[in-house]
Image: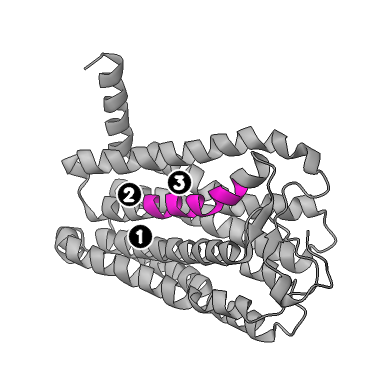
Amino acid sequence: MLNPNASHAAHHSFILTGIPGMPDKNLWMAFPLGFLYTLTLLGNGTILAVIKVDQSLHEPMYHFLSILALTDVSLSMSTLPSMLSIFWFNAPEIPFDACITQMFFIHGFGVVESGVLVSMAFDRFVAIRDPLRYASILTQGIIGKIGVAVATRAICVVFPVPFLIKRLPFCRSNVLSHSYCLHQDAMRLACASTRINSLYGLIVVIFTLGLDALSILFSYVLILKTVLSIASRTERLQALNTCLSHICAVLLFYVPLIGVTMVHRFGKHLSPVVHTLMANVYLLLPPVLNPIVYSVKTKQIRSRIAHVFQRTRNGV
C-alpha cells in the first residue's frame, strides 16, 4: 500500500476491497462469485443463441432483448478482472490507469443498459398501440440506429470521467471501498476540491438515468391508457402480459441502483459490509436474473429452450 503522504506522481495504483474488515473471508466468496459469473454467461449466451437460431424470434422485441443480453455480459466482464484478482488470487492492487479504464466501462455499460431499457419501453408501446405496423415501424435499420444512439450517448457522457479523475492529486489512502473502480469511490480519495467531479456526476445521473426512468414511466402511462381502451378483458391482459418481462428488467436495474444511492447518501453509519453487498448486488443481480426472467415470462423463448434441451436429451 502506498504511503498516505505520497505525492500524486507516486500514486500509481489503488487497493481494492473484498469483504471489508474480513480479508481472510475473501476465499469464501470466490466460488459464489464464480457461479454468478458462469450463470450470467450461460443465461445471456442461451438467450442470444436461441434468438439467433429461431427465425420466429427475429422480431423487434427480441432484437432489443439481444442488445440487453450483450450489455449485461459486457457489464459483468467489466468487473470480472478485479473480482477474480481479489477473491481468487488475493491480489487487490490495481494500476491507476487500469482502474480508470474499468471505471469508464462500468459507468458506460450502466448508461447503455438504462438506454436499452428505455428503447424496450418504446418497443412495447409501439407493439400495443399500433400492432399492425409494429414490424414496419421498428425495422432492423431503425433498431440499429437506436442501438448506435444509445451507445454514442453513453460514450459521450462517460468520456470526461477518466480525465476528471486524472486531473486530481491523490495524497491520501489509496484504498477503495469496493471490489472494482467507481468514479465516486476514487473521487473521495483526492486531496483537492472535487466539486467539478461531483457536479458532473450529478448532471450525468439526472440527464441519463433520471431522464430514462421518467421516459419509461411516461411510456407505461401511455401503454396503460392504450390498454384500458381495449374492449376485451382477455386482450387487455394479453397486452399487459407482454410487458411483464420488461417491467421486471426495469425493477432489477433501478431498485438496486436506488438502494445503492440511498445507502451512500444516508447510510454512512451502516457497516461497510452493507455498502459492499449493495454495490455488488447492483452490478451482479440484473445480468444474472434478466435471462431467467425472460426465459420464464416469454413463452416463445421458454418453449425454444425446452425444445433444445429435449433434442439434446434425445441425442438428436
- Residue at 63%, 51% (x, y): give it: 280
- Residue at 42%, 42% (x, y): give it: 291
Q: Secondary structure at mark 3?
A: helix
The percent coordinates of residue 69 (x first, y second) are 38, 49
Estimate how packed mark 1 is, as few (under 14), some (14 to 19) or many (20 or more) residues with alpha carbons within 10 Å.
many
Estimate how packed mark 3 is, as few (under 14), some (14 to 19) or many (20 or more) residues with alpha carbons within 10 Å.
many
Q: Is residue 251 above or below residue 130?
A: above
- Earlier sequence position, callout 3 versus callout 1: 1
Q: Is residue 73 magenta?
A: yes
Q: Nearer the viewer, residue 119 or 189?
A: 189
Q: Is residue 70 magenta?
A: yes
Residue carrying label 2: 233
- Earlier sequence position, callout 2 versus callout 3: 2
Pointer 1 with pointer 2, Cβ within 8 A: no
Residue carrying label 3: 290
The amino acid at mark 2 is Arg
The amino acid at mark 1 is Met
Q: Secondary structure at mark 2?
A: helix
* Residue mark closest to the camera, 2 vs 3: 3
Residue carrying label 1: 120
Name the image quarter holding the N terminus. Answer: bottom right
Q: Nearer the viewer, residue 229 or 58?
A: 58
Q: Is residue 128 above or below residue 202?
A: above
Q: Is residue 269 above or below residue 172?
A: above
Residue 155 visible somewhere in the drawing: yes
Q: Nearer the viewer, residue 25 or 264?
A: 25
The percent coordinates of residue 254 (x first, y second) are 55, 60
The amino acid at mark 3 is Asn
